[in-house]
């Protein structure tokens, strides 16, 4: 059996078993662990210079050239690794709710299956379809088991993403129709190949539609408003999976369908517009993040803000920028998952995440505080963590991008402004950390239990990965470089 | 081998035979419906052994058997079978509103009238002449007048019947008037004849032809529930017996679209008319999309919601009709209608079973259905997701093919509108999902038992939605020559 197909089917089958009445928690954890092991096997068997591997292809709609094809290259393996690692952490750390336990775990498994399916698809059509698989489980997870204003949040994310996906679908169809009849295809490899030889020459509107379609899904400013509230309201494992893995779908799509296909002649006229928007992500959303009064909302906004850097790396169209963006993709996924895991644990203990009601928690829960500190520092981009390496490469890429002019060109100005985002993220993370963990200990939080062993293992696992990729970014970069840089 | 029009003749004979049986049958009348189901399935089997049309047997303008006609004959037979099965489920409710001295009186007609309507619609999809179109359409509409109003002691049903009758009669008037204008200029009622004359129509008469076509479009717009001819839809759908609503929304709409395509064909192949006709269709599609979807968002009653959703789906289909210059548009329409059949019947099947027990079809009657009856809830969940257009369902692929055709023919405005209305669709379809899974059940609500056959049917429809949603090839294969 094809290993990639197996890694999609395992969560789906597990979800069906869970609904059918198997022990929900055990089945889900078993499936997630099995999938992670399978990923490790795939990583082990993967040949670094071999292009797409583990291929499987079944024609689905021959008239339209749609095939159900699976396969991974270096980038795909990296995303697969991110997905299964975060899934395992999220499902292991999830606390079974009081009611509807089976639907809770089934929804998580479906989100995971959708993410894995999207990242191992070689066919743009199925890549799109798999992403949508996660839409309804997210709706149910936030709506049923969320906190705060969960209903509004659930509606907003669902309708917003449904709209974004259809914009994206229009862009994908536009890309497909730009090909001459007879060579029409949805295959990533063939699309890139046809673009290289000039057969695929899409119109500018296709580029814009794709960019905004992906942009909505990745919470590009000003289409970001669905994200913070949804992540704040979602139960911790759902937020981990969505912010950590699923949101990367759009960025991954940009690396697959935009950078290898569109020539500078089409993209350049829009660079200034997109630079302004991504600076909106970094500066505007960054300032909004500073003003947040609740930990969960602050984390939601911070995750929106960091998307700006990744956009900058992709938009720079340089090797180092793209590599940095990929590194940040993985790093951000791991660090935001760790943060949401910890804030979820905190909510379980205190019932509130308002800064004004918290304080001095490091005294009652020193280990919890230490781990949160690590995760927060990773997210800020402290040297040693993968986020730092990624941001640095993005800045290098951004500064070397664009046309040489007298003085600074648009990319260099944007990069110079974007660097200030690092300061902004340091401000909000450190302030949040101080408010929650330092200061005078409050009487009502005197007896909070310390972090559980299971949660500790999950978070430490994520942090260790961040440190590994932080000290040896070339581990990952060498892996993905052949995939994102065209020969 | 079987001559093609033997299909319609057999269906009519079955109807007459069953009516006769009804007059003498003393025991359980559901036997009539079951017999109908079995015989219609046999006729469905017959469609695979048709001989080609004998040349000169009857004028080809009266009856054609092209791939589209064949596909939709099968489609209509299946829709009728499903309607009969729903009617059997519905018969206890029906009998409550049809009091009479004899037990189960009136049930026979309730089971046989859909068969006559089926014969009419099967003829409609083969008709290639305005006269035949008109006669077939009347056979269908008159059967539906009776069916809609058949629950005599139910005010809603009577109200629906009157509304459907009056507006239906009005639309028939439009149809006939339009036909006379077209006939007056071209001298033909046969579509073949019209298409041979149309390129030679002098310029000063072209507005008259267009006027006639416009009137015909009004009548067909009424059939397929396009805005602004949709006023009857919500009330009639809500008041009519549930199986009739399902039948009306699927079969009647499909037959209407086939006739629409046939009537438009001659006009779209003439350059002088093409631009204007596409313009009219684009406007129709746009307003239907907008109104259907926006109005659906505020509905609190599931039947009304499905009525507006039926308008919305007519909008998507009209997008494909307005994109007929793209090669894939006809296939897209056929596929979309095929998907619409499956998901709509699934939705109505669940609706019917829930309403039978809880006594109402408001969305709040579905509160907590996820706990009260997991199978029904799962069925409705899949139906709603497919109607909304979520990937891995047949509904998504339907929308995908239509968007593909629309982009290929350059209907960018409709595509933008479509993307927005799809997002609206997610809102109102998920409202039902929300009721089933988020909301707690009312304390008085009971669990709902479903018969093993009901389980089987729900399973079958769910399977069809998902399988065709991943591998649509079998269905597309049947549509290739459209």
Image (tube, rainbow, N blue to C red):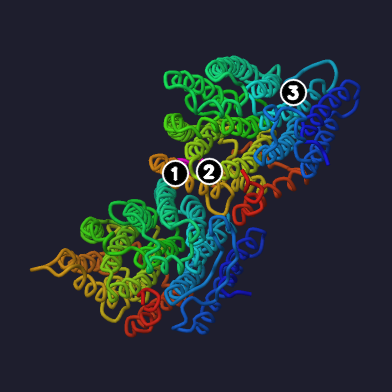
Report the front residue among B181 and B309. Answer: B181
Compared with B51, B117 (above or below) is above
Circle 3: element type: helix
Are labels 1 and 3 assigned to the same chain?
A: yes
Q: Which residue is mark 1?
A: B409
Circle 1: element type: loop
Going from N to C along the chain, the mark reached first, 1 or 3, is 3
Q: Residues within 10 Å of mark 1 (few under 14, many from 20)?
A: some
- Which is the main secondary structure of the residues drawn in magenta? helix
Q: Quadrant of the N terminus of chain B?
A: top right
Compared with B41, A27 (above or below) is below
Q: Residue at x 80, y 44 (%)?
A: B49
Compared with B65, A128 (above or below) is below
Residue B113 position within the rendered picture, expressed as x and y whole percent measured from the top left: 75, 25
Left or right: A255, with A269 as reference point: right
Q: Which residue is mark 2?
A: B329
- Circle 2 marks a residue in which chain? B
Marker disc for residue B328: none
- Residue furthest out toward the left: A406
Total numbered labels: 3
Report the front residue among B403 and B201. Answer: B201
For the record, the magenta segment spans B423-429
Residue A113 position within the rendered picture, expressed as x and y whole percent measured from the top left: 53, 64
Are labels 3 and 2 assigned to the same chain?
A: yes
The Cα atoms of the two marked residues, 2 and 1, are separated by 9 Å
Residue B206 position within the rendered picture, expressed as x and y whole percent measured from the top left: 45, 22
The Cα atoms of the two marked residues, 3 and 2, are separated by 45 Å
Left or right: A91, with B79 as reference point: left
Marker disc for residue B96: 3
Q: Residues within 10 Å of mark 2 (few under 14, many from 20)?
A: many
Circle 2: element type: helix
Asked where in the image residue B467 lies, by quadrant, the reply is bottom right
């Amino acid at each position: 059996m094809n290993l990639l197909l197996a890694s999609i089917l395992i969560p789906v089958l597990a979800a069906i078993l869970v609904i059918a009445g198997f022990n929900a928690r055990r089945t889900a954890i078993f499936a997630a662990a099995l999938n992670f092991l399978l990923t490790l096997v795939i990583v082990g068997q993967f040949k670094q210079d071999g292009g797409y591997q583990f291929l499987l292809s079944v024609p689905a709609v021959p008239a339209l050239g749609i095939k159900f094809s699976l396969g991974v290259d270096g980038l795909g393996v990296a995303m697969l690794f991110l997905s299964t690692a975060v899934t395992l952490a999220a499902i292991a750390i999830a606390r079974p709710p009081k009611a509807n336990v089976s639907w809770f775990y089934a929804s998580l498994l479906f989100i995971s299956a959708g993410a894995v399916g999207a990242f191992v698809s070689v066919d743009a059509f199925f890549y799109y379809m798999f992403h949508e698989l996660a839409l309804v489980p997210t709706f149910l997870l936030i709506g049923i088991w969320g906190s705060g204003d969960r209903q509004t949040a659930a509606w907003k994310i669902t309708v917003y993403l449904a709209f974004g996906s259809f914009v994206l679908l229009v862009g994908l169809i536009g890309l497909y129709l730009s090909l001459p009849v007879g060579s029409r295809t949805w295959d990533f490899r063939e699309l890139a190949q046809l673009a290289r030889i000039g057969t695929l020459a899409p119109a500018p509107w296709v580029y814009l539609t794709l960019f905004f379609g992906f942009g909505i899904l990745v919470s590009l400013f000003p289409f970001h408003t669905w994200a913070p509230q949804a992540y704040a309201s979602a139960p911790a494992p759902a937020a981990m999976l969505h912010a950590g893995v699923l949101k990367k779908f759009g960025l991954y799509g940009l690396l697959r369908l935009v950078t290898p296909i569109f020539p500078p002649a089409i993209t350049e006229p829009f660079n200034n517009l997109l630079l302004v928007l991504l600076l909106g992500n970094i500066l505007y959303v960054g300032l909004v993040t500073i003003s947040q009064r609740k930990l969960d909302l602050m984390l939601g906004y911070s995750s929106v803000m960091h998307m700006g850097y990744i956009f900058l790396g992709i938009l720079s169209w340089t090797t180092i920028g793209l590599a940095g963006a990929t590194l940040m993709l993985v790093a951000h996924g791991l660090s935001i998952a760790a943060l949401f895991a910890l804030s979820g644990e905190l909510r379980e203990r205190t019932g509130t995440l308002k800064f004004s009601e918290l304080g001095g928690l490091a005294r009652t829960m020193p280990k919890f505080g230490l781990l949160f500190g690590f995760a927060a520092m990773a997210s800020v981009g402290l040297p040693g963590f993968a986020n730092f390496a990624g941001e640095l490469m993005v800045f290098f890429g951004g500064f070397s991008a664009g046309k040489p002019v007298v003085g600074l060109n648009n990319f260099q100005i944007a990069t110079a402004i974007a660097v200030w985002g690092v300061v902004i993220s340091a401000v909000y993370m450190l302030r949040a950390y101080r408010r929650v963990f330092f200061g005078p200990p409050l009487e009502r939080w005197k007896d909070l239990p310390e972090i559980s062993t299971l949660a500790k293992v999950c978070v430490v696992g994520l942090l260790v990965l961040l440190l590994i990729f932080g000290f040896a970014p070339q581990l990952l970069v060498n892996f993905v470089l052949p995939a994102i840089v065209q020969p | 081998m079987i001559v093609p029009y033997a299909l319609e003749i057999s269906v009519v004979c079955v109807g007459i035979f069953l009516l006769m049986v009804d007059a003498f049958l003393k025991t359980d009348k559901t036997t009539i419906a079951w017999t109908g189901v079995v015989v219609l399935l046999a006729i469905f089997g017959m469609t695979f052994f048709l001989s080609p049309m004998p040349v000169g047997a009857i004028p080809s303008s009266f009856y054609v058997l092209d791939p589209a006609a064949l596909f939709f004959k099968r489609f209509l037979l299946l829709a009728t079978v499903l309607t009969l099965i729903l009617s059997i489920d519905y018969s206890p409710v029906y009998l409550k509103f049809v009091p009479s001295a004899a037990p189960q009186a009136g049930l026979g007609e309730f089971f046989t009238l859909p068969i006559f309507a089926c014969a009419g619609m099967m003829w409609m999809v083969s008709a290639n002449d305005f006269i035949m179109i008109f006669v077939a359409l009347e056979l269908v509409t008159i059967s539906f007048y009776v069916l809609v109003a058949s629950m005599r002691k139910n005010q809603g049903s009577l109200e629906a019947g009157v509304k459907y009758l009056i507006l239906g009669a009005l639309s028939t008037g439009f149809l006939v008037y339009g036909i006379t204008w077209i006939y007056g200029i071209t001298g033909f009622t046969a579509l073949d004849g019209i298409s041979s004359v149309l390129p030679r129509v002098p310029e000063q008469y072209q507005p008259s032809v267009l006027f006639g076509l416009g009137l015909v479009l009004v009548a067909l717009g009424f059939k397929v529930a396009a805005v602004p001819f949709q006023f009857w839809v919500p009330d009639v759908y809500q008041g009519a017996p549930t199986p009739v609503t399902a039948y009306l929304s699927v079969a009647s709409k499909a037959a209407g679209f086939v006739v629409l395509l046939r009537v438009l064909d001659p006009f779209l192949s003439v350059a002088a008319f093409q631009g204007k006709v596409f313009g009219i269709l684009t406007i129709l599609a746009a307003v239907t999309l907008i109104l259907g979807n926006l109005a659906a968002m505020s509905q609190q009653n599931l039947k009304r919601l499905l009525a507006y959703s039926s308008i919305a789906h007519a909008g998507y289909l009209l997008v494909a009709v307005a994109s007929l210059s793209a090669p894939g548009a006809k296939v897209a329409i056929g596929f979309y209608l095929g998907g619409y059949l499956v998901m709509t019947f699934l939705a109505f099947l669940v609706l019917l079973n829930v309403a039978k027990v809880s006594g109402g079809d408001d969305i709040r009657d579905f509160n907590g259905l996820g706990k009260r009856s997991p199978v029904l809830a799962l069925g409705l969940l899949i139906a709603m997701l497919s109607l909304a257009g979520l990937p891995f369902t047949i509904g998504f692929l339907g929308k995908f093919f239509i968007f593909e055709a629309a982009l290929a023919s350059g209907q960018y405005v409709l595509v933008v509108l479509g993307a927005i209305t799809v997002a609206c669709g997610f809102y109102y379809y998920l409202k039902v999902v929300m009721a089933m899974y988020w909301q707690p059940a009312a304390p008085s609500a009971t669990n709902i038992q479903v018969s093993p056959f009901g389980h089987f049917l729900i399973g079958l429809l769910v399977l069809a939605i998902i399988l065709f949603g991943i591998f649509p090839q079998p269905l597309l294969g049947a549509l290739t020559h459209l």
